[in-house]
Image (cartoon, rainbow, N blue to C red):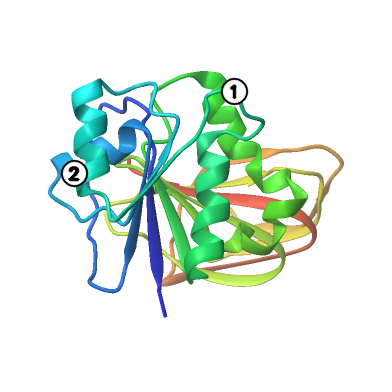
Amino acid sequence: MVKTVHIVLGSPENSGLIFTRHPEDKVIGVDYGALLVLNNRKRLDVAIGDFDSVTADELMRIKEEATEFRQFNADKDDTDAEIALELAEALYQPEQIILYNWSGGRMDHLLNLLFLVHQPRFQPIIQKLIFKNKVNTIHFYTQGKYSIEKDEGKYYLAFIGMTPLKGLTVEGAKYPVTNLDVDYPVTLVSNEITEKTCVFSFDEGLLAVIQSIK
């Protein structure tokens, strides 16, 4: 069983591409992200995209070195990232899907990525998704009760209501929250995990939890 699928997008992040690939993991490179994977000497299981951001020579290299190559017409309804997410789940059914190189580029692409969690087709994999770079780690949660630990190197904790929320309670943090109801998306930022674990729960809504460096 595949635990992790790493999806490397092509956004021009200044932080570069750094991740650890375990032998059982799979890596999907999206457009220019496929070249970034190869440049970091990591095995590329699938390369997908319209590849309008690479040169002819770079495209030839991707074709030769990727285990599987899929090219799409630039005129299509889905973004390359949306295609990559559907493919990751269809091929591997992993425990988690981590996206890299999702910030630093066009704002419309970034918003498209963050709003993916509202699309009905992605509802079954919401809690598998992790957005990660050197500064931030983002997880998404539907209603329920959860316990999280502090990520290594991270300092700040934020709870972002992607929708209205009911009954949000946060314990084990510098600023606890008790049974909060909000009728609009809300951002509760600059909190900190003060205990070994932070426990939070909510009865209705969709929540993004972000841990960030100081």
* Residue in the picture at 50% in, 47% down: 84
Mark 2 vs 1, N-terminal side: 2
Comparing marks 2 and 1, which lies closer to the viewer? 1
Within 10 Å of disc 1 (Cα), the crowding (few <14, some 14-19, many 20+) is few
Distance between mark 2 and mark 1 Cα atoms: 26 Å
In the drawing, does residue 76 fall left or right of residue 87? right
The residue tagged with tag 2: helix, strand or loop?
A: helix
- Going by the numbered disc 1, the residue's amino acid type is Asp
Residue 38 numbered mark, or none: 2
Q: Is residue 34 above or below residue 122?
A: above
- Which mark, residue 75? 1
Q: Quadrant of residue 105?
A: top left
Horizontal arrangement in the rendering, residue 49 relative to residue 43 (left or right):
right
Of residues 62 and 102, which is closer to you in this image?
62
Rendered location of residue 208, percent (x, y)? 60, 49
Q: Which quadrant of the figure contains the N terminus?
A: bottom left
Q: Residue at x 35, y 21 (%)?
A: 53
Which amino acid type is marked by label 2? Leu
Q: Is residue 173 visible?
A: no
Name the residue: 77% across, 44% down: 163
Q: Is residue 150 left or right of residue 173?
A: left
Res. 154 in view? yes
Does residue 95 lie above or below 9 as drawn? below
Q: Position of residue 149 (x, y in %)?
A: 42, 67
- Considering the image in quadrants, where does the C terminus appear? top left
Residue neighbourhood size for the residue with mark 2, other residues' Cα within 10 Å, grouped as few (<14), some (14–19), many (≥20) = some
Q: x and y percent of residue 127 in the render?
A: 59, 62
Residue 176: quarter of image: bottom right
Q: Nearer the viewer, residue 132 or 23?
A: 23
Q: Position of residue 88 (x, y in %)?
A: 49, 58
Q: Secondary structure at mark 1?
A: loop
From what the image shows, is residue 10 above or below residue 128? Answer: above
